[in-house]
Image: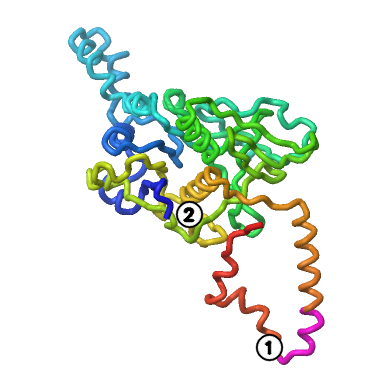
Amino acid sequence: MDERFVILDVDEKSLGEIGRWPWNRQVMAEIVGKLFDRHGIAALGFDVVWAERDASSGIDVLDSLARRELKDVASFQAAYGRLRSQLDFDARFAASLNGRPVVLAYYFNSENDAVRVNALPAPVLPKGTFDGRRVTFPKWQGYSGNLPQVLENAAGAGHINPLVDADGVIRSVALIQEYQGAYYESLSLAMVRTLLELQTGAVQQVKPVFPDDGVDLEWLNVGALEIPVDERAAALVPFRGEKRSFRYVSLADVVKDRVPPGELRKKIALIGTTAPGLQDLRATPVDSVYPGVEIHANLIAGMLDREVKRKPLYMIGAEVIFLLAGGLVLAILIPRLSAGWSSLPSVPSYGPKAEWFCRLPLRF
């Protein structure tokens, strides 16, 4: 288990103790404060999008009264001036991020009628970066970003769009996505850049590498790190095992001060959810029901440790050859076998004892 990381889990226990998700921003501001001030974490990533205003304090009603029915009542206006900042939970949450290494999440949408909500961060690479190059990006029509004041106070933000293969399994994450000609980084890449900036004290730029000035993208350089990617600017996730290969702590235990001070010191913390009703469980090669937040943890750790594997350019041809060879062998052998023996090739597809083989991570 990688002791550098901790996943702060919005689990069923948290929902039962604190209430339904999302919690109000005053609670989130208190959580951020505790994580940095009480526990001394190194950095914090949110696998959560803060796209909607929080009016749970009643601030909208107060604003309406101040503009209309009570606009001429001096005593009310005086009290309103004193109280409003305390009731603006979004502003309090934004202030809790200021000056701290906190990375937010957002996502793109490919629907034709997709909305464009709130704010995106500055692109990590400008328009024209991949002109004339053989790199494939999906077409996005819109996005759901964070509230502008929240984004402005964060250290960074990255997309959380899954890259799902044809069989419904997530094996890779697109480190770069294109939107309206500019290029945006993933949550995992934004976290790595933030961590490197903490370590070096210098801004870490992303540089795509095209060997011999060719058209095929092979690497992304971030400081001293070389991160291998494929033609989709995607990196293979170096899964470390089945779910819970990283330490999990219920976020309710942070809120209720059940985590001793010092236990999370200098940890890279990620806030995500395993609660089934919050729909962030994915199919991966190592587990069919895998928390999305742990995918980010695996990839961040892999990039920092230079463990991201590269898929060789000859792999597609090799896969075709193996499939043809396997099919030829089966075509020759099966007619010569009894009914019982000829059924054995189907066992890995259905037998629970062989299921581990189907879940092995791709490594090249």
Residue at 63% x, 58% y is 363
206 displayed left or right of 154 = right
Query: Depth check: 311 or 106 in front?
Result: 311
Q: Which element type, helix, strand or loop, lies under badge 2?
A: strand
- Specify which label sits upstream in the sequence, 1 or 2: 2
Q: CA distance from mark 1 to mark 2?
A: 38 Å
Q: Quadrant of the C terminus?
A: bottom right
Is 336 covered by the magenta stretch?
yes
Q: How many marks?
A: 2
Residue at 41% x, 41% y is 268
Residue at 35% x, 38% y is 41
What residue range appears in magenta? 330-338
Per the rendering, the mark at residue 78 is none
- Is 243 situated above or below 129? below
Per the rendering, the mark at residue 281 is 2
**Residue 348 appears at what percent x and percent y?**
61, 75
Per the rendering, the mark at residue 341 is 1
Q: Amino acid at mark 1?
A: Trp
Query: Depth check: 175 or 313 in front?
Result: 313
The colour scheme is: rainbow
Q: Which element type, helix, strand or loop, lies under badge 1?
A: helix
330 displayed left or right of 287 = right
Residue at 62% x, 79% y is 347
- Is 336 situated above or below 146? below
Q: Quadrant of the N terminus?
A: bottom left
Q: Amino acid at mark 2?
A: Leu
Main SS, magenta region, reads helix
**Residue 71 appears at what percent x and percent y?**
27, 10
